[in-house]
Amino acid sequence: MILTSIQKGDPHQPPLVFMHYLGGSAQTWLPVIEALSQHFYCISLDMPGFGDSAHLSPASIATQAEAVRATLKELGVSQPWLIGHSMTGKLVAAMALEAPTEVAGIILTAPSPLCPQPMTDQQFAMQYEWQATREHASQFVAGSHHKPLSPELEQRTLDDVLRANPAAFPYWAKTASQEDFTQRFEDITLPALLLLGEEDDNVPRLEQQLSSTLHQFSPHEYQIIDGCGHLLPLEATEKLVAIMSAFIKKYS
């Protein structure tokens, strides 16, 4: 399975591979990539069921990992930094733990943890009883960000949700989000950065992220982004660019 992608920057620069949240697409990371591509080779992927990969069936974490590796092999990318957002945070952490020598480091942005993701009844119902309507999609997007988005970003985010494979939302809620990787791998030496929005109620807070996921990586760092919700790439673009650049340069 080869995933569609957006590529920006010089392929001779260090590669950064971006993966999006539930309902997003390769476009979700575009504001961040526009800046980082001045110094890095940036590849942003459409995960199975989303973006231009919406025709693909939603997939388990293992199948997604295989697709990412196959796509990077086709693109000639090796030793990338893996950057996951929400849904793909679990994927990125699992991929790194499974094959740490293939990765330069990871950045987990408002990630789903390695343990089964806790959800409120309302959060589960929103995804499991998914309706591919503008009203339902608007509620989903509104519940994902705390800072207002520009009209252009708000519309693009809504359009991404609406063009996703409707089966991807219940599959994530019932199956993929509940996969448990906490007892599968040894701790590893690999730089890992955790970024969380101060106002994000969609994923676990710092203590659970540390105990379930981040403790398996050394060295690791974390930052809480003030006044932001779940859509950090869109709500705090400039801050993410600065933090990510500094972290990657520190450990490269």
Image (cartoon, helix red, strand yellow):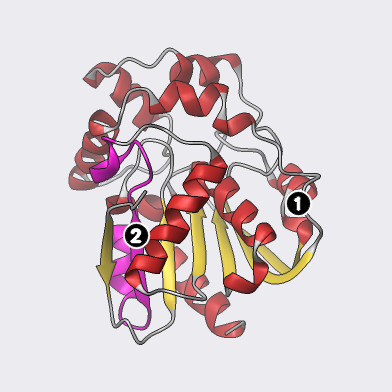
Does dot 2 land on a helix, a strand or a loop? strand
* Magenta residues, start to end: 29-55
Q: CA distance from mark 1 to mark 2?
A: 26 Å
Residue at 45 percent across and 18 percent down: it is: 126
Residue at 53 percent across and 24 percent down: it is: 173
**Is residue 234 visible to us here?**
yes
Asked if residue 31 is among those painted magenta in the image, a careful observer would answer yes
Q: Quick check: 62 above or below 8?
A: above
Asked if residue 177 is among those painted magenta in the image, a careful observer would answer no
| Residue indicated by mark 1 | 210
Which quadrant of the figure contains the C terminus?
bottom right
| Residue indicated by mark 2 | 44
Kind of residue at disc 1: Leu
Does dot 1 land on a helix, a strand or a loop? helix
Kind of residue at disc 2: Ser
* Nearer the observer, 151 or 51: 51
Give the quadrant of residue 144. top left
Classed neighbour count for the residue bearing mark 2: other residues with Cα under 10 Å, few (<14), some (14–19), many (≥20): many
Q: Position of residue 111 (x, y in %)?
A: 57, 47
Q: Are marks 1 and 2 in contact (CB under 8 Å)?
A: no
* Nearer the observer, 42 or 149: 42
Asked whether, in this view, residue 210 is left or right of residue 67, the answer is right
Asked whether, in this view, residue 159 is left or right of residue 121, the answer is left
Q: Position of residue 27 (x, y in %)?
A: 27, 52
